[in-house]
């Protein structure tokens, strides 16, 4: 699949993967117009069409952001960041393969869709089309201000990050069939802040019908990012403008839109509440409960059964629940239980999971299954082909893990194959099954069962009591 016709023009990509298992890769496809100048802090607008064939063999710039431990940097930053990447094993556009849309972590403030690990070919080689996203972050994606709400037809500001994601899902509905994907079978999945983003999609009426299954890994908005009333987010925006020295005598938005994103990020970071290592997040910029993108908080949406209920896999790593580690989130499982019960009440299946696999070398140093350790298993990096293991070591050095080499062996490949099998089976049919894995029963509060994945997989009881 060398050239594909999208609704804005033709794109060409590159081919990766082993002979007989090739994957067509298209990088940096625009799904919306660059949010520059007067489009800063506005909902995403349609991308412009182009003539001829657009060469899509290079990653785009990523959203301006702060440095975060464990996040791979090195990509250029620009507000011109609304691009996505498509990896497809399809040979013809009529194959109707399931689509898996990855939402990166980084606590709404950092990260990107360009990292090598989730652009690895091993997951799409299992018969799915993988899409990775870039979108606005931090104060560029979640900023609110009374002047912005006043100029908005919906009388709302903030939530540009989520409007970007919704625009990308709409692009997928219009275009993914040309890449061999099935727009009627879309699974959104993400880790940490990416899991929170996926859960927000489950609570926004604007995203209804744009996806059909969800996998949340170590993240959910009901815990990480509870949602903030619009008025409070506007107050934070006014405080930022004051720190930026914006005069109230002139057009405040014209002034603000002329300030560099680097300065906005710098001043925004000075307003953040310091966080002790291993403690919960206290975000300055969160989703705004604005009556439009979010009519109510994510927790209230699940509790009232007003969410976009679909089948759900909810995964937590045991080490991040019990510690020690770079992030301890004991509230994660209770938040997941609320989501699982909500989708079950509405006639869908939910699946609970605890991940507890640690490579042999790190296990010898008493390393637990810390936040994000499941990622190389999900994307098939059992041999450190992407370099992500070294990146994760930066996360756990503070916990006293001196050995940089995790000590990968045959069990890591076995576990990775099992997880990729479960995830892609869920994306294909809604039923997560894989060779060597016992039958994974849907979650019910009466049974409280879950799949425990370590060196092997087994079904256990007492999911809601893992922490307590």
Image (cartoon, rainbow, N blue to C red):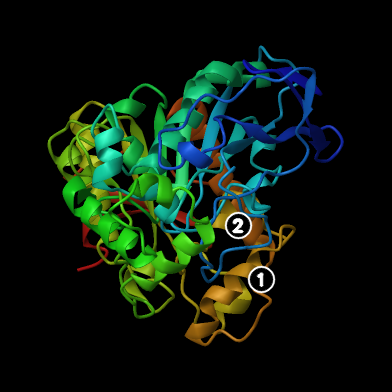
* Residue 6 horizontal/vertical position (percent): 65, 18
Residue found 59% across the figure and 42% down from its top: 80
Up the image or down, 86 lies above or below 448; here it is: above
The kind of secondary structure element at disc 1 is helix
Q: In which quarter of the image is the N terminus?
A: top right
Residue nearest the viewer, comparing 373 with 25: 25
Q: Badges 1 and 2: C-beta atoms under 8 Å apart? A: no
Q: Does label 1 or label 2 sit earlier along the sequence?
A: 2
Comparing marks 1 and 2, which lies closer to the viewer? 1
Visible in this render: residue 118?
yes
Residue with the mark numbered 2: 376
The residue nearer to you, when weighing 191 against 410, is 191
Badge number at residue 237: none
Residue that extends furthest to the right in the rendered view of this protein: 19
Q: Which residue lies furthest to the top in this view?
A: 94
The relative height of residue 90 versus residue 28 in the rendered view (above or below) is above
Is 123 left, or right, of 66 in this rendering?
Answer: right
Q: Which of 333 and 200 is in front in this view?
A: 200
Looking at the image, which is closer to me, 38 or 405? Answer: 38
The residue sitting at 75% across, 33% down in the picture is 56
Where residue 46 sits in the image (x, y, percent)?
52, 24
User: Mark 2 falls on what kind of element?
Assistant: helix
Q: Distance between the residues labelled 1 and 2?
A: 11 Å
- The residue that disc 1 covers is 390
| Residue 458 seen in this snapshot | no
Viewed as shown, does residue 303 lie left or right of 135? Answer: left
């Amino acid at each position: 699949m060398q050239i594909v016709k999208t609704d804005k023009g033709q794109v060409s990509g590159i081919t990766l993967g082993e002979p007989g298992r090739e994957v067509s890769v298209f990088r940096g496809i625009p799904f919306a117009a660059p949010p520059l100048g007067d489009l800063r802090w506005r909902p995403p607008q349609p991308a412009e069409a182009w003539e001829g064939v657009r060469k899509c063999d290079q990653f785009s710039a990523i959203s301006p952001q702060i440095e975060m431990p464990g996040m791979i940097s090195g990509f250029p930053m620009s507000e011109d960041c609304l691009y996505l990447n498509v990896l497809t094993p399809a040979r013809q556009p009529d194959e109707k393969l399931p689509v898996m849309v990855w939402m990166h972590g980084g606590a709404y403030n950092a990260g990107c869709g360009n990292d090598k690990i989730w652009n690895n070919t091993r997951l799409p080689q299992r018969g799915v089309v993988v899409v990775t996203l870039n979108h606005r972050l931090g104060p560029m994606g979640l900023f609110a201000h009374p002047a912005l709400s006043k100029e908005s037809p919906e009388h709302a500001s903030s939530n540009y990050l989520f409007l970007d994601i919704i625009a990308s899902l709409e692009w997928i509905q219009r275009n993914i069939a040309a890449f061999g994907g099935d727009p009627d079978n879309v699974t959104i999945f993400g880790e940490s802040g990416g899991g929170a983003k996926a859960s927000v999609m489950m609570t926004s009426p604007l995203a209804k019908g744009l996806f059909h299954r969800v996998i949340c890994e170590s993240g959910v908005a009901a815990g990480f990012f509870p949602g903030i009333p619009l008025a409070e987010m506007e107050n934070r925006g006014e405080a930022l403008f004051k720190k930026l020295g914006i005069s109230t005598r002139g057009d405040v938005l014209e002034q603000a839109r002329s300030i560099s994103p680097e300065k906005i990020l710098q001043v925004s970071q000075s307003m953040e509440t310091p966080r002790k290592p291993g403690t919960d997040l206290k975000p300055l910029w969160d989703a705004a409960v604005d009556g439009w993108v979010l009519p109510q908080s994510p927790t209230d949406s699940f509790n009232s059964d007003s969410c976009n209920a679909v089948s759900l896999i909810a995964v937590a790593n045991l080490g991040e629940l019990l510690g020690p580690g770079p992030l301890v989130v004991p509230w994660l499982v209770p938040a997941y239980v609320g989501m699982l019960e909500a989708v079950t009440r509405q006639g869908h299946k939910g699946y609970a999971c605890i991940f507890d696999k640690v490579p042999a070398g790190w296990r010898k140093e008493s390393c637990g299954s810390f936040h994000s350790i499941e990622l190389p298993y999900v994307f098939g990096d059992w041999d450190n082909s992407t370099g992500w293991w070294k990146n994760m070591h930066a996360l756990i050095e503070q916990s006293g893990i001196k050995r940089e080499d995790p000590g990968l062996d045959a069990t890591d490949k076995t576990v990775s194959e099992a997880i990729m099998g479960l995830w892609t089976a869920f994306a294909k049919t809604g039923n997560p099954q894989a060779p060597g894995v016992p039958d994974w029963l849907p979650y019910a509060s009466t049974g409280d069962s879950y799949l425990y994945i370590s060196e092997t997989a087994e079904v256990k009881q007492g999911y809601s009591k893992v922490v307590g």
